[in-house]
């Protein structure tokens, strides 16, 4: 199975990077082909330039590589911190530039773009791993857990992903080393469960 793993976090010492390493190592142990991108480390430019949204636009090589990989993916893992109820800009820009028409979705003939598009990604499983400093109950009650709606409904299912599994780890800022180790073990377990060998 080809699994794309996309990380949006600036700090290599972060919990998010440790989560990414746990996920990638587990996927490799299971024998999967892993395509891992630390977006910030590779200098992914999140700003969609004028003209690039057009269906037939010529894409810069890095964006074209991401598009080719996501079109081939049999599984997807995304990891990022909760920043204002949203992903960091580098990952938001990855969505803007990579999940593009003709790659991730397509409007049916005769639809000028106002209708419901067809998702083009494989009907795969996507695992979304988030970190947060807000208790889960407060995130839901006060903010409506915007990351759930964003990833599951607005982006991934829209693009044809069949199953979305999401886990938000927190509260990070008050967590103990023991707690963080337990979270990393849970990441490995989730990966084994959702992407079996
Ligand atoms: C710009 C910014 C915005 C943030 N917004 C939120 C927020 O809306 N809710 C929240 O619970 N934590 C928020 N945080 C805290 C991060 O979620 C937290 O630091 C991160 O999940 C910890 O994981 P890490 O060690 O991998 O960075 C924010 C942090 C930053 C830097």
Image (tube, rainbow, N blue to C red):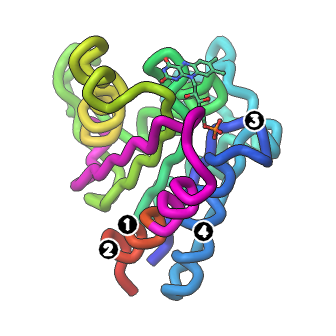
Which quarter of the figure is the C terminus placed in?
Answer: bottom left
Q: Is residue 179 left or right of residue 25?
A: left
Q: Residue at x 75, y 35 (%)?
A: 10
Please tell me whether mark 2 sits on a helix, a strand or a loop: helix
Residue 63 lies, in percent from the top left, at 67, 41
The residue identified by callout 2 is: 193
Q: Are marks 3 and 1 in contact (CB under 8 Å)?
A: no
Counting residues from the start of the chain, the first of labels 4 and 2 encountered is 4
**Which mark is nearer the camera, 1 or 4?**
1
Distance between the alpha carbons at the discs numbered 4 and 2 = 14 Å
Pointer 1 with pointer 2, Cβ within 8 A: yes
Residue indicated by mark 4: 24
What residue does disc 1 label?
A: 190
Q: Which residues are magenta?
A: 158-185
Along the line of sight, the residue nearer the viewer: 76 or 107: 76
Q: Quadrant of ligand 1?
A: top right
| N-terminal-most mark, 3 or 1 | 3
Q: Is residue 166 left or right of residue 22?
A: left
**Residue 26 in view of the camera:** yes
- Would you call the spot at circle 4 few (<14 residues within 10 Å), some (14-19), or many (20 or more)? many
Q: CA distance from mark 3 to mark 2?
A: 28 Å
Say whether residue 121 is left or right of residue 77.
left
Disc 3 from disc 1: Cα separation:
24 Å
Q: Which residue is mark 3?
A: 10
53 shown above or below 3: above
Q: Is residue 26 above or below residue 58?
A: below
Disc 1 from disc 4: Cα separation: 12 Å
Mark 4 and ligand 1: say if the CB distance to the nearest ligand atom is below 8 Å.
no
């Amino acid at each position: 199975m080809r699994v794309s793993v996309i990380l949006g976090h600036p700090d290599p010492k972060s919990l998010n990077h440790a989560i990414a390493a746990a996920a990638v190592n587990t996927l490799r142990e299971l024998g999967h082909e892993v395509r891992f991108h630390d977006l910030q480390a590779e200098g992914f430019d999140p700003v969609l330039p004028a003209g690039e949204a057009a269906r037939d636009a010529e894409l810069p090589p890095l964006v074209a590589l991401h598009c080719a990989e996501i079109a081939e993916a049999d599984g997807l893992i995304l990891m990022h911190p909760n920043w204002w109820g949203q992903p960091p800009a580098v990952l938001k820009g990855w969505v803007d530039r990579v999940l593009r028409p003709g790659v991730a979705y397509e409007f049916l003939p005769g639809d000028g773009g106002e209708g419901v598009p067809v998702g083009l990604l494989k009907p795969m499983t996507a695992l979304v791993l988030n970190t947060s400093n807000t208790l889960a109950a407060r995130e839901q009650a006060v903010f409506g857990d915007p990351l759930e709606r964003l990833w599951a409904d607005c982006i991934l299912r829209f693009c044809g992903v069949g199953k979305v599994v999401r886990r938000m780890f927190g509260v990070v800022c008050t967590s103990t080393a023991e707690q963080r180790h337990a979270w990393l073990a849970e990441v490995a377990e989730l990966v084994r469960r959702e992407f079996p060998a």
